[in-house]
Amino acid sequence: METLAVVTRNQFVESIHNGCICVVDHKGKIIYHKGDENTKFFFRSSAKPIQIIPFIERGGAEKMNFSLKEIAIGCASHTGESMHVETVNGILTRLGLSKDDLHCGISGPYNEDEKIRLITSKEKPSPLHAGCSGKHAAMLAFSKYLGTDISNYEDISHPVQQEILKVISAFTEQDIDSIPTGIDGCGVPIFMLPVNKMALAYAKLTYYMEDDKSKYHQSSRTVFEAMTKYPEMVAGSKEFCTELMQATKGKLIGKIGAEAVYCLGIKKGNLGVCLKIADGSERAVYPVVMQLLSELGVLEKDEYEALKHWHRPELKNNLQERIGHIIPVFHNNKIIRLGDRVNSK
């Protein structure tokens, strides 16, 4: 692992975030990396744009009348705003199901305004507010399309999860038997893979959507179009994934995963990116992504201006006084230690 970002107080390094980065093309050629490109960790919610591929590929999304907006919520780690809740509930209603059929558990909305609204109106959160409810709704739809039992759709032995595992294997070029699995926070299987192979999955998605001879052409194109057309569904108001895709207007997709995983699929060059902050701290992810996009020359000036508040975010104390920054440092190729002075610019 290499030092990717630091947290400063009065320009002195107070905390250090190590991690790894890998950028590959659709053939798996490494374009850029920091740290060991074979480092393994769980794909977490960054896997969602790949997990929904078999549902589309097998014809389920078309048969179940999924709109692009609904595909986007199927790829989402959403913030539980009304637009998300209503979209997921709409899917379930059309399927003849209810929130009780979701096996993602109950969690309060991540969005602060919605959280306050629920409290003041004395409403209780439901599975619809859970950030993974869209993915689970899509899995339920896939299960119904396949004619399988929906009561255990989250089990790894279920046909839905086996179809997903096959596609994960295809997109990462890893044998199914070589992919360790775990249980994600929402109860479904999740996959441990090398960082370069998770990057490869995103590179392949961007390549397949342009290659009309590819088996996964239409499904990859649908996912990319859904996420870039409805970025507010993928995360939510004031969230990085949403703002990134809004600002870049169809040139890339980006998806956060729990424990500080982040993946990108970049249209130009069919590049895939995967990065991980070793200590699982999300606060370091977005400055690192911003620096990497700058290093790769992906962002135009106006795009960067719309996103620059994520690059070196200010840290404030309880009095709203600026006391430091989170600063990406991996591009400097310098050894940085606690107590070193680092310029915020």
Image (spheres, grey):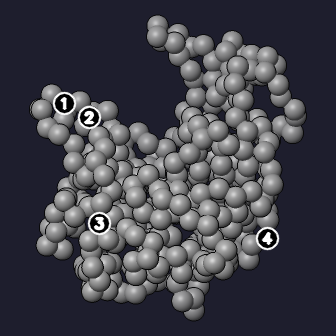
In-image side of 169 versus 333 (left or right) = left
Q: Are marks 2 and 1 in contact (CB under 8 Å)?
A: yes
- Where residue 119 is drawn, which disc sits there? 1
The residue that disc 4 covers is 29
Q: Amino acid at mark 3?
A: Ala
Secondary structure state at the residue bearing disc 3: helix
Q: Amino acid at mark 2?
A: Lys
The residue that disc 3 covers is 137
Residue 14 screen position, x and y as percent: 70, 19
First in sequence: mark 1 vs mark 4: 4
Secondary structure state at the residue bearing disc 2: helix
Label 4 neighbourhood size at 10 Å, few (<14), some (14-19), many (20+)?
Answer: few
Q: CA distance from mark 2 to mark 4?
A: 44 Å
The residue that disc 2 covers is 115
Secondary structure state at the residue bearing disc 4: loop
Q: Are marks 1 and 4 in contact (CB under 8 Å)?
A: no
Residue 277 screen position, x and y as percent: 66, 43
Label 1 neighbourhood size at 10 Å, few (<14), some (14-19), many (20+)?
Answer: few
The N terminus is located in which quarter?
Answer: top right
- Vertical placement of residue 196 versus 302, above or below: below
Q: Are marks 3 and 2 in contact (CB under 8 Å)?
A: no
First in sequence: mark 2 vs mark 4: 4
First in sequence: mark 3 vs mark 4: 4
Q: Which corner quadrant of the image does residue 68 belong to?
A: bottom left
Judge depth for marks 1 and 4 and give the one in front.
1
Asked if residue 90 can be seen in this view, the reply is no
Q: CA distance from mark 2 to mark 1?
A: 6 Å
